Image: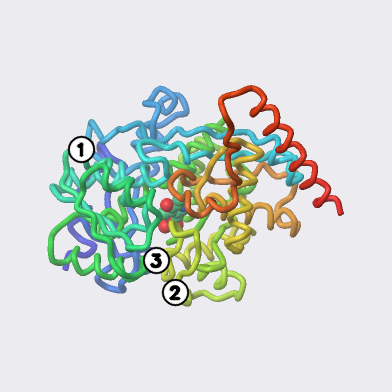
């Protein structure tokens, strides 16, 4: 056992200096380890903020690279050259048409549907995890994934020259499967749901000595999500928003946006504010929303059944921390049906020109539901986190987007098709009106 005592002293050059149990506070060395040996609680990276407060200013950050690595001092890596494939600094879009539709005055969309290199927020956590994996001497990296994580791990491992074996549930969308295979990893499609994949991977992690980004490397991996908090604060002109809405799978992303905001306050980069945290789940997999609504302090695991596969985790590791944060900040956790998720995807596309996947549809549908219930004030500066790209989950909306008008390459064919489509539109409008 390697508890509290012999912690490496890296504080002179690096602010992170230990892994610490979120439950009992026991400290460990900075190795590949995610569970406390004393109480089985999750481990988290601990920093010396007094050191950061002295060395970091808005200017030093603004002078950094145009990627997540402008926040390197807040991330658990020591490399001079971390793996930088342009991850992060995605657009924070001021919404006008969606805002008006919902009746909000200051709505922003944080658009990780265009994150690099694989079009989801997972590129953030994987860039950090694989940089750390190399530092710790791993030559093979792996993960238990709902789809996007496998895409990111395979792509960034290819870039970094690491061997890669990733695990997914066998029933994922074609775009998610192809989006991993193109990088030629070993891809294990497990007959089972994510929670079964995860259990299998925990066993493999113990026997094969691989770096599993979201298992034994999880404390480092999860820190990457803080950059979704940092970027929003910086992009709002070094200010925190009033309210954020984000999707919940394991609850890690949600908890780390919270940690990111608090760190910026702690080191004096932004003024303190109670940011309200609201979480989004699909009704077909909503163990965190149910715990929140029933006022429970434990998660009741469930079997997922939803089109929002990327956030379908029935036994979420950080679920209880998400409930805590929503309660503490006067936020909410809501769930929506698959039909509402599809509407959410279409609504964001039609009002903002952003094509998100089912997870983003979940976020937008929950945003709408919270506004309609009076749980988001129109005056609040609100940020909705869009975490993935719609091109990866085409089968979810295929039946709901209409069809192209196929015509001959002749002017009259075009004119009559145009007339038919306008008549159809008028009819649809009449149906809406009656
Ligand atoms: C993984 C994922 C999430 C949520 O991740 P957690 O950190 O496990 O809560 C949200 N959106 C998308 C698109 C994802 O792939």
Instruction: Check the picture and name the quadrant holding the C terminus.
Output: bottom right
Question: Can you see residue 154?
Answer: yes
Q: Residue at x 56, y 53 (%)?
A: 399
Residue at 48% across, 53% down: 395
Q: Is residue 253 visible?
A: no
Task: State ligand 1's quadrant.
Answer: bottom left
Tell me where residue 25 sits by quadrant: bottom left
Q: Mark 2 sits on what residue?
A: 303
Mark 3 lies on a secondary structure that is loop
Image disc number at residue 160: 1
The response on whether ligand 1 sits within 8 Å of label 2 is: no
Quadrant in which residue 173 is drawn: bottom left
In three-dimensional space, the C-alpha distance between marks 2 and 1, rounded to whole angstroms, equals 36 Å
In percent of width and height, residue 75 lies at: 34, 42
**Disc 3 residue: CB within 8 Å of ligand 1:** yes
Element on which disc 2 rests: loop
Residue annotated with mark 3 = 317
Q: Residue at x 34, y 64 (%)?
A: 42
Q: Around disc 1, counting alpha carbons within 10 Å, would you say few (fewer than 14), some (14 to 19), or many (20 or more)?
A: some
Q: Residue at x 37, y 62 (%)?
A: 171
Nearer-the-camera pick, 429 or 295: 429
Residue 357 at x, y = what percent?
Answer: 50, 49
**Mark 2 or 1: the one toward you:** 2
Among the two numbered marks 3 and 2 on one chain, the one whose residue lies closer to the N terminus: 2
| Among numbered discs 1 and 3, the one appearing first in the sequence | 1
């Amino acid at each position: 056992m390697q508890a509290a005592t012999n912690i490496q002293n890296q504080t002179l050059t690096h602010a992170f200096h230990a892994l610490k149990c979120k439950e009992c506070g026991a400290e460990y060395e900075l190795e590949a380890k995610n569970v406390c040996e004393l109480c089985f609680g999750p481990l988290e990276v601990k920093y010396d903020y007094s050191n950061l407060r002295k060395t970091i200013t808005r200017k030093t950050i603004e002078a950094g690279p145009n990627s997540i690595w402008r926040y390197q001092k807040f991330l658990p890596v020591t490399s001079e050259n971390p793996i930088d494939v342009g991850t992060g600094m995605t657009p924070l879009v001021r919404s006008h048409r969606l805002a008006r539709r919902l009746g909000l005055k200051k709505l922003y969309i944080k658009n990780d549907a265009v994150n690099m290199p694989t079009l989801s927020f997972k590129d953030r956590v994987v860039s950090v995890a694989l940089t750390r994996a190399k530092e710790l001497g791993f030559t093979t990296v792996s993960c238990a994934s709902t789809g996007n994580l496998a895409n990111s791990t395979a792509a960034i491992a290819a870039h970094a020259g690491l061997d890669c074996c990733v695990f997914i549930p066998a029933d994922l969308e074609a775009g998610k499967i192809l989006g991993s295979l193109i990088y030629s990893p070993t891809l294990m499609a497990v007959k089972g749901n994510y929670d079964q994949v995860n259990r299998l991977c925990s066993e493999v992690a113990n026997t094969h000595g691989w770096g599993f980004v979201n298992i034994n490397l999880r404390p480092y991996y999860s820190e990457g999500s803080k950059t979704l908090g940092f970027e929003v604060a910086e992009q709002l002109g070094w200010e925190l928003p009033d309210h954020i809405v984000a999707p919940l799978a394991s609850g890690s992303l949600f908890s780390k946006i919270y940690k990111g905001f608090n760190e910026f306050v702690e080191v004096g980069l932004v003024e303190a504010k109670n940011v309200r945290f609201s979480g989004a789940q699909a009704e077909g997999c909503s163990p965190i929303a149910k715990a929140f609504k029933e006022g429970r302090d434990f998660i009741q695991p469930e079997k997922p059944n939803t089109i929002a596969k990327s956030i379908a985790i029935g036994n979420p590791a950080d679920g209880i921390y998400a409930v805590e944060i929503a309660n503490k900040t006067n936020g909410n956790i809501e769930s929506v049906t698959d039909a509402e998720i599809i509407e959410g995807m279409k609504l964001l596309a039609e009002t903002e020109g952003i094509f998100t996947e089912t997870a983003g549809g979940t976020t937008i549908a929950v945003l709408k539901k919270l506004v309609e219930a009076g749980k988001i004030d129109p005056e609040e500066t609100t940020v909705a986190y869009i975490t993935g790209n719609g091109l990866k989950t085409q089968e979810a909306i295929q039946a709901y987007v209409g069809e192209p008008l196929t015509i001959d390459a002749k002017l009259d064919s075009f004119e009559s098709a145009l007339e038919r489509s306008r008549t159809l539109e008028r009819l649809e409008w009449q149906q809406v009106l009656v």
